[in-house]
Amino acid sequence: MTIFELMTQQIHPNKVRQLLFISILILLTYVIVKEMYFLLAAFLGAITLYVLMRNFMFKIILRYKLKRWLAALIMMLLSLIAITIPSFWFVSVAIKKLTPIINDPSIINNTFQTIHTYLLTKFDIDVLNATNLNKIYSQVMPFAQRAIGGTLSTLGNVAVMYFILFFMLTQATSLELWIRKHMPLKNINSDKVIDEFRSLVYSNAVGIPIVALFQGFVGMIGYWIFGVNQFVLMGLLTALCSIIPVVGAMAIYLPIAVYLFATNHTWQGIAVVIWGFGVISTIDNVARFMIQKSISDVHPMVTIFGVIIGINLFGFLGIIFGPLLLSMFTLLVNIYIDEFGGVNSDEMAAESKEE
């Protein structure tokens, strides 16, 4: 008797068909995900906007008796305006300020050379030599390219994102009922996953940008007071760098301070250091505590490693989705332990009766 015949005798035919069906589903899922992966950022963006808009949309439907499709279009238009105007302003300012540097790279090279000479002369610190700069470039540039590339890819998928979002908003009730019905969890854990997911989206999609804007605005005020050139651009860069794990806004205000020292603006350099550590960093801690922790108590380590993972996966939007994925992973592990980690008391009682 062959091995196949032995296996078919021990395994019920229905189980064989079930395994075959699951194998086909897994294969098709792999093919679909692989071919549609480039739309993942658009899909995640639609989910994020859905969570943020859902309650507001239902409120205007009940208050103004609007059709669901019309309310969805209004919410989508408002969100598009809210996203487009700040983004357009940011990009226009960045392009205006960075164009001279792009056209004349010697500006940034001279700045680094000034800082390097000062550190080497005053403190015998040789960190900005050609070798180290190349190492920094080789580490930072791929990270920046992934972030920028992901951003451009997301901008290209905006239409897809809003297409998905429209159907999610217009079919919100049936969609949520379907999700609750098919989640393989106890009702209490299903509610826990949904509530935690909602709070995490608010914490990351709202909290992180607001904290970054606070830091950038406060930094720009300080740079203006202490006579830093291009203080608007430096404020924008401070906002951007504030989301970088570990280093944060310090990546901007410390080099500014060192450059001021190197160009004999000693008191301005001291003021920028005090402003950076005393005000900008404090704003980060206070704003993050007040905003993010009030929405969802996300551990700082989750944010740090989540941003690193997210940018590698999704580009710039990984700043939001990375911590979200890591938080959801932690939550699902805890729920798995709750669901399957112990023996249920009813099952124990049933087993004792059988014995």
Image: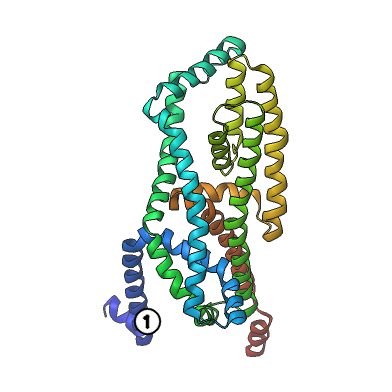
Instruction: Please give the name of the residue rendered at 50% of the width and 53% of the height, measured from the top-left corner.
Output: 85
How many numbered circles are shown?
Answer: 1
Quadrant (top left, top right, bottom left, bottom right) of the N terminus: bottom left
Q: Can I make out residue 171 in this image? A: no
- Residue 167 image-quadrant placement: bottom left
Query: Does 196 appear above or below 187?
Result: above
The amino acid beneath tag 1 is Gln
Q: Can I make out residue 194 in this image? A: yes
* SS state under label 1: helix
Say which of 294 and 322 sits in front: 294
Query: Does 316 appear above or below 53?
Result: above
Quadrant (top left, top right, bottom left, bottom right) of the C terminus: bottom right
Mark 1 Cα within 10 Å, few/some/many (few <14, many 20+)?
few
Name, please, the residue furthest toward the bottom. Answer: 353
| Colour theme | rainbow
- Residue 206 image-quadrant placement: bottom right
Name, please, the residue furthest toward the top. Answer: 121
Residue 234 at what x, y percent from top left?
Answer: 56, 34
Residue 329 at what x, y percent from top left?
Answer: 56, 61
Residue 219 at what x, y percent from top left?
Answer: 63, 36
Query: Does 52 appear above or below 176?
Result: above
Q: Determine which residue is flagged by label 1.
A: 18
Residue 106 at what x, y percent from top left?
Answer: 41, 21
Name, please, the residue furthest toward the left. Answer: 2
